[in-house]
Amino acid sequence: MKLLTETHSEHIRGILSCFDRIVIQGSLHPLCYAQGMTSFLNKREIRIFDFKQFAQPFRDTLIQNAQQIARENNLEIEYIRKKNFRKEDRIAEIIKKRGNHPGLVHIFSAPELCTAYEPWHDKEAKRSFLRPGTGKCLHYYFYFIHDVLGLCYVRVPTWIPFRLQIYFNGHNYLATHLRKRKINYQLLDNTFVDIDNFEKAQEIANQFDVERLHQILDDLAKKYCPVIDTLQLNYHWTIMQLEYATDIVFFQKEYLQDMYDTLTRTAIHTVKPEHIATFLGKKLHGNYQDEMGNRFDTRIQGTRIKHTMGDSSLKMYDKFGTILRIETTTNNVSSFEHYREVVHRDGTREMKVAHVKKGIYSLSSLSEVFRLVNHRYLEFISTIDDKRVGILNLNRISKNVVEKNHTYKGFNFFSDYDNRIFLTIARGEYNLRGFRNKDLRTRLRENTTHTICRVLKRLRLHGLIKKITHSYRYYLTTLGRQVIATGLKLKELFIIPQLATQG
C-alpha cells in the first residue's frame, strides 16, 4: 500500500522533517549534586556551614552581569510579577517592533524554584555535609536572536549549582542555513509554509552540526554565567526536551481538511495503548503505570490529536489548515533505544540495542529514531486514508496457502486466536529487535514450540513477517503492519458497531 504522501503527491507542495523545540540543560560537575558540592568545598578547605557565604559573591556577580548586559543594550530588565505571564507573547511584541535582526531582544527576571543545598552535621558520624533540597532564587531569562540558532533564550539561576537552560528551535536553525545557501523560504510560527527546494532543505536538516552547537553553548555560558571562569569549571550539556516534526505541506486548505477530518476522527477511536507503544518503539508491559491515552484539542492554529505514553507523546496537527504535521515529543530521550556501542564497567565494548544517552551528541541518532516514529504513524494514517487497498490486502491474507502439499490456512480477524497473534507481533518492543518463537510462547502460553513454529510459517507464507538473516528473530513486513492496522480498525470501528445496531 502506498503512503498518504504518495497517493496525494500531486496536491502536496513538499515534505520536511527536522527538529522543532530543543531545550538543553547545562550542569556543572561536581556542583550539580550534594555529595559533589561537599567534596568541592572540602578540597578547598571551606567549612560546610560557610556554604552560603561562599555562594553569595557568585550571586552578586550574576546580578551585576545581567545589569551590565542590560545597560550595554539600552534595555530594562522586566521583573515578572504575574503567575500566568507569557514571556513568548511579550517577546513576539518586541520583535514585531525591533525586527528579527541578530542581537539581544529582552531580559526577564523572576524568583523561581531551584536546586538548593542545606548544611547538615551528623553527630553519630561526626561529619558535616550538604543535603539536597529545593529553594527559590532569582532567575534571569536572556532572549536574543542568534546568527546561527535564531531566537533563543538562556535561563540563568543566581544560586549554586547554576543549572542553565537554553532553548532554540530547529526550524529557525534550518532557516539560517537556507539563507546562507540563498534558498528562498516562508517561515511562519516555526513552520515552513513554503521552500523553493524541499529536497535540499531536507539534506541540510539531516546534517545537524552538533560540534558547532557545543561551541555555541559554551560561548553562551561564558557570556551569561561568567562565574564559571572563577570556579574553573565547564558545563556538561544534556537534552532536556526535544521535538521532531514531519510537515506535509499541501497546496490547498480544502483538500487537506477533507482528508484530515477522517484521519482524526478515526485515529482518536482506533489508537489503543499497544499502538502508541508500537509507534514510539517502546515496550508496554503489565506493570506499566505512567500516563497513557489519546486527546483531541481545538487550538488557534488548528486542531490537534495527541497520543501520550509517559514522558513522550506523538501529535498530529493541521497547522494553518494547509500543513499536516506529525510530531514526536519527549522529556526523557533515554526512554528510547537505538543500536550503538556500549562500554561495560570492565572496559569491554559491545554493539547492541541500548537506551539513548542524554548528551547533546545523541541528537544525530535521535533525528533518525524520531523520524522512524513519525514514519510509523504516517504508515498508520495512510491505512485510514486508503481503505480500498487495505481491504484487498485483508482478502489476500484470509486465503489458504499451499506449500509442499501442506495447507496453511488464512487469517481471520474474528478468530480470537488469530487476533491475539496479531496483537502480540505488533507490540512496540518488537519494532527494534524483532521477536522469537520464545517471545510468542510467553504471550500465547497454551502453545508448544512446534505450534508456534507453524504459526510463524503461516505468517511468513502470507507475507506478514520476515526472518532476520542469520538469526532466529522475525519482524513485521510493511504489508504486515498495514494489514494488522487496517484489520483491527475495520473490526473495531465499523463492523462491530454496525452489528451491534442490528440487535
Image (cartoon, rainbow, N blue to C red):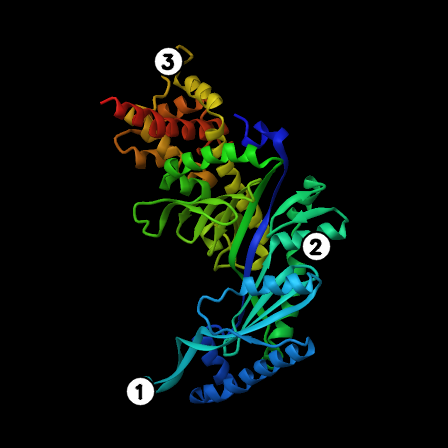
The picture places residue 503, in percent across and down from the top left corner, at: 22, 23
Q: Nearer the viewer, residue 29 or 388?
A: 388
Res. 149 image quadrant: bottom right
3D distance between C-alphas at marks 1 and 3: 79 Å
Res. 411 image quadrant: top left
* Residue hosting label 1: 123
Q: Is residue 409 left or right of residue 303?
A: left
The picture places residue 13, in percent across and down from the top left corner, at: 65, 36
* Residue hosting label 3: 407
Label 1 sits on a secondary structure element that is: loop
Residue type for callout 3: Thr
Label 2 sits on a secondary structure element that is: helix
Q: Is residue 252 visible in this depiction of the protein?
A: yes
Disc 3 residue crowd, few under 14, some 14–19, many 20+, Cα 10 Å? few
Earlier residue among tags 1 and 3 = 1
Tag nearer the camera, 3 or 2: 2
3D distance between C-alphas at marks 3 and 2: 61 Å
Q: Nearer the viewer, residue 45 or 74?
A: 74
Disc 1 + disc 2, Cβ < 8 Å? no
Q: Which mark is residue 176?
A: 2
Q: Is residue 287 left or right of residue 217?
A: left
3D distance between C-alphas at marks 1 and 2: 59 Å
Tag nearer the camera, 1 or 2: 2
Q: How many marks?
A: 3
Residue type for callout 2: Thr
